[in-house]
Image: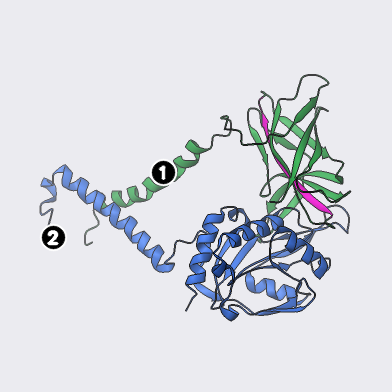
Chain colours: A green, B blue
Amino acid sequence: MSRPTPLLAALALAAILIPAAALHAGPHSSAPTSRPQPVPQMAAQTTAQTPSAPLTLSVQNAAVVAVPPGATETSAFLTLRNTGRAPVILTGVRTPLARHAMLMTTRRDAQGRTGMAMVPTLTVPAGGILNLSASGDHLMLMDLTRTPKVGETVRLTLTTRDGRTLTVNALVRKP
Amino acid sequence: MTDLPAPAPAPAARPWYVSALLAALAVALLLGGAWVFARARSPFPFYGTAYTPPVAARTFSGTDQEGQPWTFRPGIGGRTTALFFGFTHCPNICPLSLAYLDKARQALTPEERARFDIVLVSVDPDRDTPARLKAYVEFFGQATGVRVPEPALTEVARTFGVAYQKADVKGVDSYQINHTTATYLIDASGHLRVLWDYTQLPQVDRVVRDIRYVLENPAP
């Protein structure tokens, strides 16, 4: 290459921009948060106690991580879908399996350490989903009252800021 | 001013399709160059993050889950090791890492499996006794759980670039440990070749592909 012409400069720019644009387009087309997606297998049973209107939440894939005998804590994961027009704000969780159960988030600090921190609330956005998973927001169950058995279901009761509750039956399984 | 040789002697008179062809050629050259550069740095398209060049892993010693003295001698006996740091009070990241590494192990052939180890080094030597480690690693898969006492642990972690720190959750007895969440793959020549973050491990097929390549291609 002996003569850098405007054409070449434009080409170089295009070579960078085209793949970048393609990358950018990916997530938009593949993962809209509010579009209904096919519901995989076992949906957990849910019941909502209703002082006023029924909760607009549905639950998928509720699970408690199975742990070995002697373990004193575990975590629970589920996907909550909010079909309503208002966000649902979770303020707590309780379960007969643990003396303390809390809403947690996963954080990574400047040194690259990943850790869990309690949060006062988790929000299921209006018309959206809240995914509780090992790599993000989740439920932590501390001071287990017993060792959960693989395959059993454990009751989790989520409470919302407006005083309503959602009962979820979560399946105990290994990751 | 020298003119470009061959296809376009008179730029002003260049027809549009020649320009288009040159444009396509230039894009292809640029992308091809980037590809060649990436392959030259790491000839295998690793799913995890590759060490380029591979880095020699350090020897260290501790106690295994049977309470026996245990020493990590990188690559000894032609073995490849997936090693990560965790603790048994960890309720999600460590079980996930152990479980998915074990799924990868099970996806290997028996011959490959015989040359592959999974090691969990505890970052919580105060609470992780050999008995606790044994129950934990055997529940989630098949791995060696190692307790390295302080201050040796700090030094071992430093050589891997691992950071960890206690974090109180509820009271003094129920602390958690914030830690870096990579799994390191060490080849049969004792070199660090690739690392995966725990969020990558559920893609078992891609992890297996990395392990297979490293099993067959230890660093010189």
Above-or-below relation of B87 to B92: below
Q: Nearer the viewer, residue B122 or A154?
A: A154
Label 1 secondary element: helix
Residue A113: x %, y % from top left? 68, 59
Tell me the chain of label 1.
A
Q: Magenta stretch: residue A81 in it?
A: yes
Marks 1 and 2 in Cβ contact (< 8 Å): no
Residue B43 is left or right of residue B148, and the answer is left
Residue B57 is left or right of residue A60, and the answer is left
Residue A63: x %, y % from top left? 73, 43
Quarter where residue B185 is shown: bottom right
Outermost residue on the top side: it is A52
Q: Residue placed at 13% from the left, 53% from the top?
A: B8
Q: Residue placed at 28% from the left, 57% from the top?
A: B29
Quarter where residue A154 is shown: top right
Residue under label 2: B5
- Amino acid at the residue labelled 2: Pro
Above-or-below relation of A106 to B144: above
Q: Residue placed at 81% from the left, 44% from the top?
A: A102
Disc 1/disc 2 C-alpha distance (Å):
34 Å
Instruction: Report the magenta stretch's main SS.
Output: strand
Q: Nearer the viewer, residue A66 or B183?
A: A66
Q: Which residues are magenta?
A: A72-83
Label 2 secondary element: loop
Residue A14: x %, y % from top left? 33, 47
User: Is disc 1 in the same subunit as disc 2?
Assistant: no
Circle 1 crowding by C-alpha within 10 Å: few under 14, some 14–19, many from 20: few
Quarter where residue B60 is shown: bottom right
Residue under label 1: A22
Q: Magenta stretch: residue B133 in it?
A: no
